[in-house]
């Protein structure tokens, strides 16, 4: 049976005005609760207004009501993709303000933690970004490897994500027995998976088509926009805090800083892939040089006296009581301390008035600043590219909204 | 096999001796179908969302429970998994997502922040999503392990198992004005919590409400 | 290293005179300069453009409310990529005029950072292209949360907060006329 149909074409001019499309805040491709208001001319983006704050949990206000050590559990809920890194940078800032030198073992353990977290965070970015361009397999591979780091977290701290592993003056505990062997095993076997993911994506025609020449930003624009971390290095600017403002003896480790050329999504991908390999190199060296000795500093301002002393000695008991009930006291002053985070320059600005609680605890959020460039990057591109550009910036909403 | 063959196929006719029968209760078969193909709507906001992704990935594999299809559209979802903190700015979004879901629907509150506000007893946070949407299962933990989420989903399955079609109206009834209104009245809360109050009714009796530092100028209310 | 810093302070005092109200070193190696809020834009432009200093990366704009001292202090963190130098500029604002000139024209990164300071502290940035709330809802009516006189749990009761939150109508945002910055609809 055939039916002849005549289609009535509308008379006059079609409405060719710009459209307003709302993406998010609950959308699988926005990597969190980000809302993007896009004004579109057909498929082309005219302008974007990112609307953030849908995860504003008032960390900074809450920090003013917590003692110095009580802030540590807040830090890992801020960036749940690299929790140990946030634990470390917060206590490092406070230690710098207190002029407290941690032990050699603690330094190396923190380097291990931070480099492990860089891989941990980049793997999630890799998996979710691959999904955004239509590749599901890398997500499964990446999560399998992440699961191994989850196990390392769990063996060390007891928790999978919310680690809260650091304390002012050291760590919550020394590394458990056999932990370094597990980590070494990971360092040795992980490159295999990385190569596999590499072979799936790096020369993949679809991936190249979706990323090359998309969301390009020049070096000087990137500096002006406040880009840091892999995003800035993809634009060809050599700025890595591990080299430029070294902390924890990073100048003594041998590693290279990957630099991109074009500043597009593909270069950002390449830089992150190479960073994972370099992190493995650092992990390998750190595992080799891990010294023995105590992990916590022996400083009366932060460390508790031993149990025997408390039982036999009045002064030690008072000391114990005061540290436990009042918390650590930090001398007045302010301190900005930053490390090379997985997403960019991750800084902590702490202000103390000498009390047991901070006057102000400010996080310099790398993804907040990186996201603010999105309107500039996506202008003129298609809607489908917007998803890729947004993914390539590697944002985490917990830290953007704080 | 082509379309032709299919057309010539004998249609099942009642009374045909080749057919096998299974007699059961309608409730059972409906609930069996419902509980074994729950499509979750992942409302993931923070840390718990990462654990939810981990449960969907290969090691924990939600697909074993007929839930591998994460339904990102609320229209096709059966169970809302609210994973993570919900600030007041997100509250209407959550409510709207819930309203868009078709009946029958269930809700899991995953993690301490979604269930009670968690550590974030602050100006911007909803103190438990049960003030916004009705919740069937609370999964404790900060964040819960994937096993915890899977156990929560299995509890939903148990719950569905015991539902009855005859009771449909009562089970699905929802007070449209109820959202945001505390269920317990002040006297009840006071009797249970004494002088401390709880996080939703603190301003009545608790001195915890006075958390501002005194001796400063008033900032202007707009 | 220290020599260079001292001479930079001297050069700043030479150029701006009394607009530089003080300088200190925090934590051993962090240079802090206190400046008059009325001169912030000139001083930051000078620091960014002068040969030999080149503070080209604005890392952070934030504010501190000390509570014991009335007013809010705006803090800029600067970094020079070529010279590898960190610098912190502080401008203390008196409590009766929380106003400062915006540096969003100098650095693109200042745009959102200043909006955040406005949102959480209520500091007015004059000349900012798009100064509106960024983290809190646009119609948030309880004040500026990071001020010291703002209670941790907000000013309203939880019931009222939930009620106000659920009243927000997201359908509003779909009509272009109601959006700031989205008003131009081409009608050809």
Image (cartoon, grey):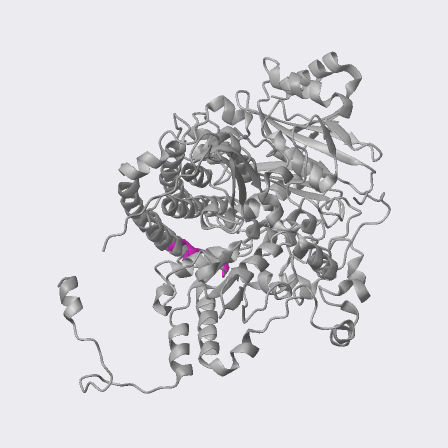
Q: Position of residue A93 (x, y in %)?
A: 61, 41
Residue shown at 76% from the left, 45% from the top? C143
Residue shown at 80% from the left, 45% from the top? B221
Q: If the image is split into quadrants, where does the N terminus of chain A sit? A: bottom left
Q: Position of residue B54 (x, y in %)?
A: 42, 58
Q: Position of residue B79 (x, y in %)?
A: 48, 66
* Vertical placement of residue A320 versus B213, above or below: below
- Residue B206, visible in the rendered structure: no
Q: Which residues are magenta?
A: A148-158
Of A34 and A296, the residue lying toward us? A34
Indicate the quadrant where residue C45 lies. Answer: top right
Of A305 and A55, the residue lying toward us? A55
Per the picture, the main secondary structure of the magenta-coloured stretch is: helix
Magenta-span inclusion, residue A151: yes
* Vertical placement of residue A35 versus C47, above or below: below
| Apparent side of residue A206 relative to residue B67 in the rendered image (left or right) | left
Q: Position of residue C138 (x, y in %)?
A: 68, 44
């Amino acid at each position: 049976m055939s039916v002849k149909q005549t289609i009535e074409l509308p008379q006059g001019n079609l409405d060719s005005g710009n459209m307003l499309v709302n993406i998010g805040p609950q959308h699988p491709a926005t990597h969190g609760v980000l809302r993007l208001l896009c004004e579109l001319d057909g498929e082309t983006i005219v302008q974007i207004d990112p609307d953030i704050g849908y995860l504003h949990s008032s960390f900074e206000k809450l920090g003013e009501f917590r003692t110095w050590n009580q802030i540590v559990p807040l830090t890992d809920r801020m960036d749940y993709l690299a929790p140990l890194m946030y634990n470390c940078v917060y206590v490092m800032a406070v230690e710098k303000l207190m002029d407290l030198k941690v032990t050699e073992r603690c330094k190396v353990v923190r380097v291990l933690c931070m480099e492990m977290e860089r891989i941990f965070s980049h793997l999630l970015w890799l998996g979710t970004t691959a999904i955004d361009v239509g590749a599901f397999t890398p997500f499964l591979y990446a999560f399998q490897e992440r699961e191994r780091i989850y196990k390392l977290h769990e063996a060390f701290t007891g928790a999978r994500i919310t680690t809260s592993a650091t304390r002012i003056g050291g760590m919550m505990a020394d590394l458990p027995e056999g932990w370094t062997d597990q980590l070494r095993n990971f360092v040795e076997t992980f490159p295999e998976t990385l190569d596999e993911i590499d072979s799936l994506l790096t020369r993949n025609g679809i991936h190249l088509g979706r990323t090359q020449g998309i969301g390009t930003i020049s070096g000087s624009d990137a500096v002006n926009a406040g880009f840091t971390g892999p995003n800035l290095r993809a634009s060809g600017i050599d700025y890595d805090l591990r080299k430029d403002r070294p902390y924890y003896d990073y100048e003594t480790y041998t590693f290279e800083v990957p630099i991109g050329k074009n500043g597009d999504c593909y270069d950002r991908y390449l830089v992150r892939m190479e960073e994972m390999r370099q992190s493995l190199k650092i992990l390998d060296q750190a595992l080799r040089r891990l010294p023995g000795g105590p992990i916590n500093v022996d400083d009366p301002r932060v460390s508790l006296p031993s149990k025997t002393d408390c039982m036999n000695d009045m002064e030690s008991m008072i000391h114990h009581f005061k540290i436990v009930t009042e918390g650590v006291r930090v001398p007045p002053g302010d301190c900005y301390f930053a490390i090379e985070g997985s997403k960019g320059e991750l800084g902590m600005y702490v202000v103390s008035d000498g009390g047991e609680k901070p006057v102000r605890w400010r996080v310099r959020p790398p993804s907040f600043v990186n996201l603010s460039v999105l309107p500039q990057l996506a202008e003129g591109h298609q809607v489908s590219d917007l998803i890729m550009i947004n993914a390539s910036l590697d944002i985490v909403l917990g830290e953007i909204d704080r | 096999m082509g379309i032709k063959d299919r057309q010539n196929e004998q249609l099942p006719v009642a009374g045909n001796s080749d057919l096998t029968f299974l007699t059961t209760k309608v409730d059972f078969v409906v609930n069996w179908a419902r509980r074994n193909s729950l499509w979750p709507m992942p409302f993931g906001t923070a840390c718990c969302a990462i654990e939810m992704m981990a449960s969907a990935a290969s090691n924990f594999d939600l697909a074993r429970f007929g839930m591998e299809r994460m339904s990102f559209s609320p229209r096709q979802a059966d169970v809302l998994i609210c994973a993570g903190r919900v600030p007041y700015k997100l509250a209407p979004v959550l409510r709207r997502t819930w309203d868009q879901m078709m009946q029958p629907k269930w809700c899991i509150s995953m993690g301490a922040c979604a269930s009670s506000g968690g550590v974030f007893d602050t100006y911007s946070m909803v103190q438990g999503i049960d003030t916004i949407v009705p919740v069937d299962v609370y999964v404790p933990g900060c964040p819960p392990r994937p096993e915890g989420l899977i156990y929560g989903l299995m509890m939903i399955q148990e719950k569905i198992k015991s539902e009855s079609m005859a009771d449909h109206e009562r089970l699905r009834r929802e007070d449209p004005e109820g959202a945001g209104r505390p269920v317990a009245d002040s006297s009840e809360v006071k009797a249970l919590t004494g002088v401390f109050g709880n996080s939703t009714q603190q301003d009545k009796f608790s001195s915890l409400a006075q958390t501002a530092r005194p001796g400063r100028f008033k900032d202007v209310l707009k | 290293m220290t020599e260079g810093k001292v001479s930079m302070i001297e050069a700043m005092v030479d150029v701006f005179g009394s607009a530089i109200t003080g300088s200190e070193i925090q934590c051993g190696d962090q240079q802090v300069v206190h400046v008059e809020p009325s001169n912030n834009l000139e001083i930051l432009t000078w620091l960014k453009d002068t040969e030999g200093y080149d503070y080209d990366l604005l890392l952070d704009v934030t504010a501190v409310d000390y509570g014991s001292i009335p007013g809010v202090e705006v803090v800029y963190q600067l970094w020079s990529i070529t010279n590898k130098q960190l610098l912190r500029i502080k401008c203390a604002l008196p409590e009766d005029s929380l106003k400062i000139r915006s540096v969003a024209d100098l650095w693109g990164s200042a745009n959102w950072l200043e909006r955040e300071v406005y949102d959480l502290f209520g500091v007015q940035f004059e000349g900012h292209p798009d100064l509106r709330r960024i983290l809190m809802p646009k119609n948030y009516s309880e004040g500026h949360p990071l001020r010291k006189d703002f209670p941790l749990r907000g000013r309203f009761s939880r019931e009222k907060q939930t009620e106000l939150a659920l009243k927000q109508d997201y359908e509003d945002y779909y009509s272009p006329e109601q959006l700031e910055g989205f008003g131009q609809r081409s009608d050809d």
